[in-house]
Amino acid sequence: MTESLIGFAVLLALILLRVPIAFAMSAVGGIGFALLRGWEPAWAMTGQVAFDTALSYSLSVIPLFIFMGNILAGSGVAQGLFAGANRLFGRMRGGLAMASVFSCGGFSAVCGSSLATAATMSKVAMPSMRRFGYDDKLATGSIAAGGTLGILIPPSVILIIYGLLTETNIAKLFIAGIIPGIIGVALYLGAVMVAVRLNPALAPKQADPEPLTRSDMIGLFSVLGLFLFIMVGIYGGFFTPTEAAGMGAGASVVIAAVLRTMSWRDFFDATMDSVRATAMIFAIIIGAELFTNFINFAGLPDALAGFVVDNELPVWAVIAFIIVVYMVLGCVLESLSMILLTVPVFYPLMFELQFANELLLDPENALIWFAIVVVVATEISLITPPVGMNVFVLKGVLKDVSLGTIFKGVFPFWVADILRLTLLILVPSLSLWLVGAM
């Protein structure tokens, strides 16, 4: 166990020195394994992990969903989604901020990435909110917080990675994320209402929203139709999640062709963005596999489980500790790295604790519930200072807005997220009802 703790300390030191997380995990995992087993086994393991990851059929779902999200982002469907949400909420004070949250939830349902959702919606929603005199705090806060929904509402790349790491049914993880995602949208809308009630200057009253154009209608129904196409296809038994990614990617190209809003240059840029994102994710996965092999061989998961069992720590105290760990890690890591780094440690611990008995659930449902709790905790870390990856993405797009302004704006949504996480922990059926119904 001592070797594992030293490895974690070295890893965090490299991250603080701005070494890319993929290379930091690869270096610590590979060298640590070599020191324990020898250099020849370490080189063999490194080559095998890289080979297996690159050729994994299960992981092919990742570049396909990324490509789908990038094509949709470049084809302008987000504009139609925002216009439709504005028609729904526009007459209310703070309606544009509510429309931003609602459209973030809708766009994330076909994008699967929090960072892509935040970046895309900032370009669509921010100009409208500024034109109508919205305070930058409310405007940026609604977009940054709404963007976090991208890692929970299916199809979610993070849930896919979790399912592959733990051999959990991905289709069940997807369906389990729907109700918590809807609760997140509802609480965010409530946060906007409370914020503008306490401080009306954040959002002036707005005139009636303009009618939807034909392009807006096509974009709106394209998003809704694609989401239903993927979900019905998976749960109707027509195709697997991996096949659904391919079908969704193909459908997104058809949507872009019908809308005629994407040039060949835009298509090329979306493709290259997908290639770069896929290369980055696969590099992180390979690094995480190497690091996981090292800490498993060093005995960290078994040592933690033994410590918890020997000291008879209550299950709820362990879950609370895990959530605190995610909040702390969110200060230095983004969501994918956190999942890859922590799940191989915490997942065996949950098995050892037999926490399914504590929740009065069967083991599979208990681990699905744990996945949703972990992902929501990761969501919260995306808008938690001092880092908050979504906040920094927004800052990169909106260079004239300070980080302090955005962090002030996300505070009401952060409180709403804490409330949602509490509800999901205390009432597991919120995550599992649809799983049972399916």
Image (cartoon, rainbow, N blue to C red):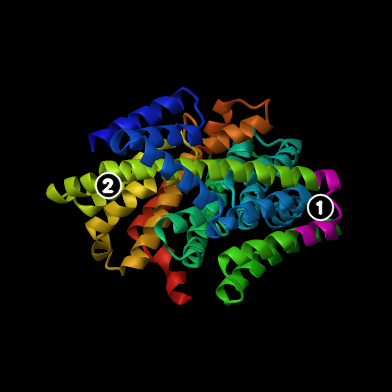
State the extent of the magenta-drawn residues as a range: 253-266
Q: Is residue 285 left or right of residue 423?
A: right
Q: Residue at x 53, y 38 (%)?
A: 410
* Front in this rendered view, residue 25 or 387: 25
The image position of residue 108, as x and y in percent, is 61, 53
The image position of residue 52, as x and y in percent, is 50, 52
Could you say whether the residue bearing mark 2 is in a helix, strand or loop? helix
The image position of residue 111, as x and y in percent, is 64, 53
Can the viewer see residue 121?
no
> Which residue of the protein is positioned furthest toward the top in this rendering?
17
Query: Which residue has dot 2 on it?
Result: 301
- As displayed, is residue 334 above or below residue 399? below
Could you say whether the residue bearing mark 1 is in a helix, strand or loop? loop
Q: Earlier in the sequence, mark 2 or mark 1?
A: 1
**Marker disc for residue 210:** 1
Q: Residue at x 48, y 58 (%)?
A: 180
**Marker disc for residue 153:** none
Q: Is residue 375 left or right of residue 8?
A: right
Tag in front: 2 or 1 = 2
Q: Residue at x 68, y 33 (%)?
A: 397
Q: Amino acid at mark 1?
A: Glu
Q: Residue at x 40, y 62 (%)?
A: 368
* Front in this rendered view, residue 196 or 421: 421
In magenta segment, residue 233: no
The image position of residue 67, as x and y in percent, is 68, 52
- As displayed, is residue 159 above or below residue 278? below
* Front in this rendered view, residue 211 or 171: 171
Are there few (<14), some (14-19), or many (20+) residues within 10 Å of tag 1?
Answer: few
Location of the N terminus by quadrant is top left
Q: Amino acid at mark 2?
A: Pro
Q: Main secondary structure of the magenta part?
A: helix
Can the viewer see residue 348?
yes
